[in-house]
Image (spheres, grey):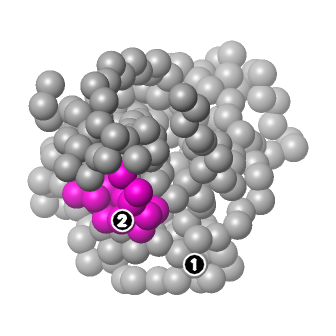
Amino acid sequence: AEENLIYRAAQILKPHAKKFCGLHIKIEKNIPMGAGLGGGSSNAATTLIVLNQLWECGLKQEQLADYGVKLGADVPIFIYGKNAWAEGIGEHLSFIDLDQKQFIILKPDCFISTQLLFSQKTLTRDSKTTKFCAYQLEPSNFGNNFEPLARQLYPEVEEAMQYLDQFGQAKLTGTGACVFIEVTNEMNIDEILKYSPCKSYLVNSLNESPLNHFKVTR
């Protein structure tokens, strides 16, 4: 479909192609849809990065990021493939190094409408701006303005967050629907995954995307 982010990313780069060739793109979908995990945005970023090489467009990373933000606010962070503190709508990035950690992610059996959450009159829209250093000092003082709305409007999200709240501070991924918690030494990971009320995953954090070292081979 022409609205697909992968298709749109390819169309953006097409005029820059010095060595154009037709494509058949196959997606192995591992990131759940409607999860708030950036699956669509990472698809778009991957397309821009790979086609920039394959078609010999010669665009710099910054140029790809500028095109990426036209496809989605969080596409640029996948272009750069590094942890970052994001400002604006997500396009102003300050790169940071974070300790590698493990997280448990739950995927409630629902699809959250981002448009619905943004349309809610009770959504907090005037949060004070802050800096990463303030977040580092006391991360528990920070939250996600969409979380109370997601919990209220989607019982599946409320159930998942209540479950994880038993073990620490559960958090919502973007507008959801996934919820997650940082793994600690005290946790019985197998038990938490086993008795989860919905699909559950154990994941490792990264400081850099493997895509940063991708090279097209002909």
Is residue 177 rendered to the left or right of residue 112?
A: right
Question: Viewer-proximal residue, 126 or 79?
Answer: 79
Tell whether position 157 is magenta.
Answer: no
Range drawn in magenta: 57-70
Secondary-structure class at tag 2: helix
Tag 1: amino acid = Phe
Q: Is residue 12 visible?
A: no
Label 1 crowd (10 A; few <14 / some 14-19 / many >=20):
few
Residue 81: x, y in percent?
A: 55, 54
Q: Is residue 190 visible?
A: yes
Tell whether position 67 is magenta.
Answer: yes
Instruction: State the residue at coordinates (46%, 18%).
Output: 28
Residue under numbered circle 1: 132
Instruction: State the residue at coordinates (36%, 22%).
Output: 25
Q: Nearer the viewer, mark 2 or mark 1?
A: 2
Secondary-structure class at tag 1: helix
Is residue 134 rendered to the left or right of residue 183?
A: left
| Residue 187 disc label | none
Residue under numbered circle 2: 63
Instruction: State the residue at coordinates (39%, 18%).
Output: 26
Count of labels in the image? 2
| Placement of 55 over or under 129, stated as above or below | above
Residue 154: x, y in percent?
A: 30, 34
